[in-house]
Image: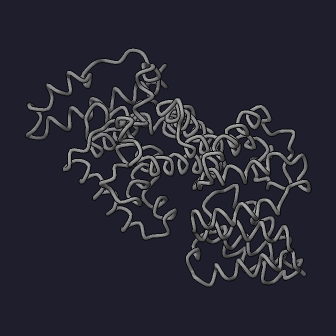
Amino acid sequence: MSTDAAGAVEAVYRSDWGRIVAALITLVGDFDLAEESAQEAFTAAVDQWQVSGVPEFPRAWIIQTARHKAIDRLRREARFEEKLESYAVSGLVRTIEEPDYDSPEIPDDRLRLIFTCCHPALAPEAQVALTLRTLCGLETDEIARAFLIPPVTMAQRLVRAKRKIRDAGIPYMVPETKDLAARLDAVLTVIYLVFNEGYAATRGGPLVRTDLCAEAIRLGRLLRSLIGPQPPAEVTALVALMLLHDARRDARINEDGDLVILEEQDRSRWDHRQIAEALPLVNEAFRGGPGPFSLQAAIVAVHCQAARAQDTDWPQIVRLYDLLERAQPSPIVSLNRAVAVAMVEGPQAGLVLVDAIASTSDLDNYHLLHAVRADLLRRIGSSAEAAKSYQRALALVTNDSERRFLERRLREVQPPAA
């Protein structure tokens, strides 16, 4: 396959999988059919683009091809005749000559997809997993790693969730304002997980997937506008949180694509206009009470307001993590709090907390637990133990940029070869 064609297919998959599947679900009303048709269209692109060249509008080509694949699938099924007429009305059989998928009517497709995935009839874990699969295009094994469960278990959850949506006739739509509250927490969580997958990609070379970060921010803004003029504090907080994280994006990697940790970042490369936009939103959200996203946004705001790493108000961050642990207790929140405590009281104090978390085994397969432990051991001079924790983190990490960072740190604590 030619490099240009291969790169084009990969680029469309990474940037447009979610919107393609969302558009197809709008048309065919079936998750499995939409996903399978999209996958078949990408496979066809691999074969055809290397021969005929990359089309002028690659995404439009794939959606049109996927529509044709869906029609072919329906022709092979007994329900074809009764469904084809309704699909034709919705536009399934129309020929696409221009990429009309960025028209004002279409962006809601992805928001409708999230609200459908987050229907209260589905278990919370299934809501998140289904969105990560359909909107972000993550593979089942990648989602399973995020949930720290076997891939077979995750595959079963996805199958059950899709079946429930189909059998229960769950509508593919954004609910009316009066019905938003029942799904809002799940929707906010899912949007933030989409952002996190962009901010620290699970797989592959690049640490950051700007397409997913931008998509999550767009969805957050859209959701906030739909619920206006006085959106719930946590909606505003989520938008602020994502903007603040995203403002540091360019400083998080160097020219070689390697990870640059927060304390070593060139803060002149932060997007200070975006920070200035986000800070008033943090204040607005916090006035609504210290919810989980409001507290996380406040923590990131403290970082973003420090001109230098040594100016960071770590005691304030510890106090905010104390509140967050009460509002949203989780071992990952406790791990982040331990890092903050280490910055205030020293690495030994942080290590005591990290070892307590590790003793529960809740995060045994979470590479950042071992990376944090290794760093604290390095800072107190326990190089041999630090090396063991770095090696454990390396056995679990799946992103190439993070892997290279951990390998460099491992070399720093290993004795020189004789």
Residue at 52% across / 62% down in the picture? 146
Camera-nearest residue between 69 and 50: 69
295 sits to left or right of 121:
right
Camera-nearest residue between 273 and 258: 273
Residue 260 appearing in the image: yes
Q: Where is residue 68 shown, x and y percent of the image? A: 27, 29
Q: Quadrant of residue 408?
A: bottom right
363 sits to left or right of 109:
right
418 sits to left or right of 330:
right
Residue at 35% across / 35% down in the picture? 176
Residue at 84% across / 67% down in the picture? 343
274 sits to left or right of 34:
right
Residue 5 appearing in the image: no
Where 366 falls versus 243 (above or below)? below
Camera-nearest residue between 151 and 286: 286
Where 202 falls versus 85 (above or below)? below
